[in-house]
Image: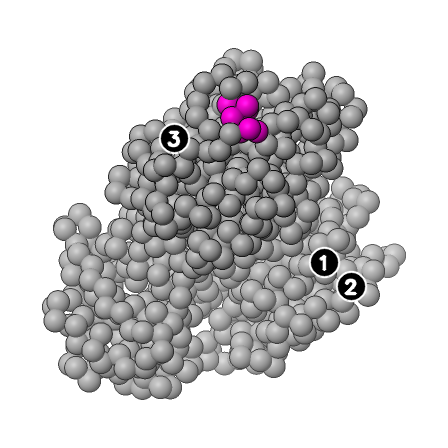
Amino acid sequence: MQPLRRGDPSSIAGHRLIGRLGAGGMGVVYLARSGGGALVALKLIRAEHAADPGFRERFRREARAAERITGRWVVRVLGADPEAREPWLATEYVPGPSLAEAVALHGALPEPTVRALGARLASALDGMHAADLVHRDVKPGNVLLALDGPRLIDFGIARSAGATALTATDAMIGTPGFLAPEQARAAGAGEVGPASDVFSLGCVLAYALTGERPFGTGGVAAVVYRTVHEEPDLTDVPDTILPLVRACLAKDPAARPTAAEVRAVLGEADAPAGDWLPSGLPALIAQRSARVLDLPVPEPTMLVPPEPPKGLSRRGLLMGGSAAALAGAGGLTAWLLSRTPEGTGVGTLGGTGVGTLGGKGGGAGAPLPAYTLGLLTDLSGPLKVYGRAQERGARVAVEACNARRDRLFDLVLRVVDDGGDAARATAATRTLLKDENLIGVVGPATAASVVAAVAELVDRSVPLVSVLAAVPTGTTVPGQTMRRTYFEPRSAADTLIVPYIRYLSEHEAVRTALVEDRAGGRDSWFAVKSIKTTPPAQDLGGVVTTHPVAKDSEDFGPAVRAALATDPLGVMYVGTSPRRAALCARALRDQGYEGPCGGVEAALQPEFLRLAGPAAEGWYFGTAFADPDGLPAAKEFTAAYRKRWGVPPAVPVEPYAAEAFDAVNWVIQALGTAVANHAESVAAGAANSLRQDAYQGVVRQYSSAGRDSSVAALVGLFLWQVKGGVPRFLGKFDEAAAAGT
């Protein structure tokens, strides 16, 4: 990466530029930080190209199409502005090397690595082709390597949108050496279809396996001639994969397999990636991830004030990168375990004053406009306890809003029950949308409900906020690339291991045993990988051992026996099932273990306490919810909540009641901004405010960065312990871990 030049802007559309990643004929690609703290690659198109009306129209069309590119193995588009004087496009930033760089540094890759690489790239292309899109430039330089798998980049949204790149009949689309014969013949874009991408993928596979281009090197004309008229050199391609590569490189597009067929031959693309990279590359990726964190804050150019926003440390400014990218390298876990919260990287905002408690009673004068806020949650299914708590917390917030004399509007809360089911969530959301005054929805309890609800809400630009449901990494939430309407201001599920692991570190547990429940799938695999990358008491030489339990077995005895043979100072159940966590607890108790045990929020359910019985005593859990009785800032809320719902002091406030209260007040603040700004669409104005403005709640600070920001994840984690058969709140994870019990 190169430093910014004096002619470069310091910021673009709220993105603070950090350095130059590259430059070409169409524009410059910058490393930038979004307003929410996430690191992005931002491509800025030169004004001379943007002056062409035809270019702008093609850019608009391609930018809209980019919303459909949302697979796990692609670098997603996060935002774009085709109407700007210099149009721009922002994508996720992946700190790993390109495939071209990896092969140049380490040579040809082993066949298992290439099979995993090819399966995932084929999966990415299959998703694009299903959306009627063609990449047109699949090559090693457009494949980035991350610890959990490759990422396909550069979808031609800016570069290939120019007239000479897309529409001219004498233009060659793609990169010589990796383009298909129909591209090399410059026969026009009409002949460049999905089969062209498959040909390019075959070239990439051959290159990765041999370290050489299948059609050789040299002048462009020579390479293009060989591509059209000669057979590829596949001498060093292993026989086990040679038939597939040869089929991909067929001259006739109709003779090539589809991307889906390539994926099927190579193996499962969406299985846990595991240790797919050869020795040396994981260290390079981790090194580059760490290097991003240590980048100095660049000196401002002439276009912006010299001072960064107050309240941001230099390191904090750079910590907003993708949680998936950094956690994949162990960096997120390491940082969370070694830091104390410093805030979310956005200043506390005063808000509109319409959602706080203790306001003046009853309004007078002309009738106020009324807006509807929907609460979509589980009131009859497996998470109904949390759903009821959300409803109660939301009603306290709405009633406080409507009690203020200085309010700008009245708020109506409409509650719908989806039972935690996607189909019911779709129907319930359509019911809410019949209300023309609907300005937002809060409260889904499951990821399936989130995806179903957003699919219905996105066309109306109605925002949805979830503090309970955690959408898994890689899951596509509809329509979130250009104008974000879904907000998940809670800690990602992957970070919930941090509180208990931090506790073990504080108590110098140099030997930790993990009972890996493989029924937990990707969640268990990723947690084990993260903990082993950054073990508790790492500075003291801490070691971690793993003891798996097959997903189809309920006998935890052998795994526990093997774990205890290592004389651990701490044991962790790594899984998501309350019932299976209870089986683990009972096995530990039966074999006489009396040391600290722990798990994550998913296992902390009544079922665990009931089935584990006395064996649950003393267990620690990391959660994304707090007990408001244990937070001084929530004192006023808990008093109002208990009074409104008749909850006695001896009974704890239900999980996620306070978080729902905060979520509603965040939406109220956003609604106040939209109303004050006379937004043409109040719902869209509220969504825009949610993207830009943070909210200081009684539990924590909420922002659009949510789980995608490492800093936001850090301040939303809490530690609990089972005492006397019930969970007891110990506090914010860092403070509670240091205090111990």
Q: Quick one: label 2 or label 1, which is nearer the N terminus?
A: 2
- Distance from the alpha carbon under mark 1 to that under mark 3: 49 Å
Looking at numbered disc 1 in the image, what kind of residue is underneath it? Answer: Leu
Q: Is residue 191 visible?
A: yes
* Residue 476 in which image quadrant: bottom right
* Tag nearer the camera, 1 or 3: 3
Closer-to-camera residue (261/65): 261
Quadrant that contains the N terminus: top left
What is the x, y in percent for residue 738? Answer: 26, 57
**Mark 1: secondary structure:** helix
Quadrant in which the C terminus is drawn: bottom left
- Give whichever of discs 2 and 3 has the lower sequence position: 3
Please name the predominant secondary structure of the magenta segment in the image. Answer: helix
Gap between marks 2 and 1 measured at Cα: 8 Å
Taking the spot 57% from the left edge, 46% from the top edge, the residue there is 256
Please report the bounds of the magenta region as a residue range: 223-229
Q: Secondary structure at mark 2?
A: helix
Q: Residue at x 57, y 29 (%)?
A: 228
Q: Earlier in the sequence, mark 1 or mark 3?
A: 3
Residue at disc 3, secondary structure = loop
Q: Residue beneath label 3, please? A: 212
Please name the residue that numbered disc 1 is placed on. 457
Q: Position of residue 68 (x, y in %)?
A: 65, 48
